[in-house]
Image (cartoon, rainbow, N blue to C red):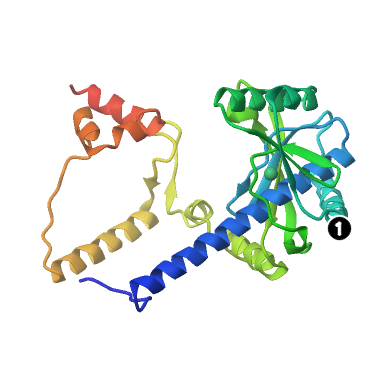
Amino acid sequence: MQFTLKLFKSQEEHFHFRAKIFFMEKNLDNLRHSLSHLLAAAVLELYPGTKPTLGPPVEDGFYYDFDFTAPPSEKDLPKIEKKMREILKTWTTFEGKEITPEEAKKIFKGNPYKLELIEEIKERGEKITLYTSGKFTDLCRGGHIETMKHIDPTGFKIDRLAGAYWRGNEKNKQLTRIYGLAFETKKDLEDYIVRKEEASKRDHRKIGKEMEIFAFDDDVGGGLALWLPNGTVIAEELENLAKETEFQAGYVRVKTPHLGKESLYLKSGHLPYYKDTRRWNMRKQNTTSKQ
Ligand SMILES: [Zn+2]
């Protein structure tokens, strides 16, 4: 049984739709990245002496990692958000400028994080660019909104704080990450917040525990579900439905082992993607004990 959903009248129409989505996403990324500059500018005004590190756009907004002398708490977030809106009024656009590694090192001499990035850009043989808006200048390779007029001051919100190690490495210093949510309009932002709240109420980890569907145990391993009676009933009913549907469609079932030799995963192309992960190691321990 095959379901076909025809959304587009022609390939050309499909192409135009894909192109439109691409540009919308790119614009949103530029908007979010521009807001990460604004966040850094607000933080530096409120907390002088803070060392900004990196600030990329993410799927629902942006973040920036900072090395604070005295990190802010959740209750300080509205103050940072307010400062961002104040500064936004004074910014018009981003001015880009290419500089030499030596000049860049001089500008960021008090910031070991930026110095590390400058050294890496230099080693890769890439151009070093600075982008300035208002009084704030950052080391950045570009990708901003054309004009600040395109930023809806009610379309973003500072969301939360988190700890983050520099370059994601736990041997490095822990920084403070400030997350923001950002959309083109206030309505898009509000809709997203509602959807997120609704989704968290339906989070499978929460429901699974409350309804006694599954449990986890450290002795078994992280992410390995132990199906409780309520969950087992659901799983069996789904399996029955799958079997019936397959039978009606003329399929016959086969069974294969859950594990295979390392060479099989190498041949299938999975091994290079999973060899460094815990999941692979677990699989490897299980298989090698029998070889
Ligand atoms: Zn930038």
Residue lying at the far bottom of the rendered structure: 9
* Rendering quadrant holding ligand 1: top right
Residue at (45, 33) in percent of width and height: 218
Q: Is residue 155 left or right of residue 43?
A: left
Q: Amino acid at mark 1?
A: Lys
Q: Position of residue 191 (x, y in %)?
A: 64, 68
Q: Quadrant of residue 173?
A: top right
Q: Is residue 127 left or right of residue 71?
A: left
Q: Quadrant of residue 42?
A: top right
Residue at (28, 58) in percent of width and height: 236
Q: Quadrant of residue 1?
A: bottom left
Q: Is mark 1 within 8 Å of ligand 1?
A: no
Judging depth in this view, the residue of 6 and 127 nearest the camera is 127
Judging depth in this view, the residue of 226 and 102 nearest the camera is 102
Q: In the rendered image, which residue does mark 1 sit on? A: 89
Q: Residues within 10 Å of mark 1 (few under 14, many from 20)?
A: few
Q: Position of residue 268 (x, y in %)?
A: 23, 38
Judging depth in this view, the residue of 168 and 247 nearest the camera is 168
Q: Is residue 122 left or right of residue 225?
A: right
Q: Work out which quarter of the rendered image holds the C terminus and state it.
A: top left
Question: Is 241 above or below relative to 26?
Answer: below
Q: Position of residue 276 (x, y in %)?
A: 39, 28
Judging depth in this view, the residue of 37 and 61 nearest the camera is 37
Q: Position of residue 142 (x, y in %)?
A: 65, 44
Question: Is 265 above or below relative to 9?
Answer: above
**Tag 1's secondary structure?**
helix
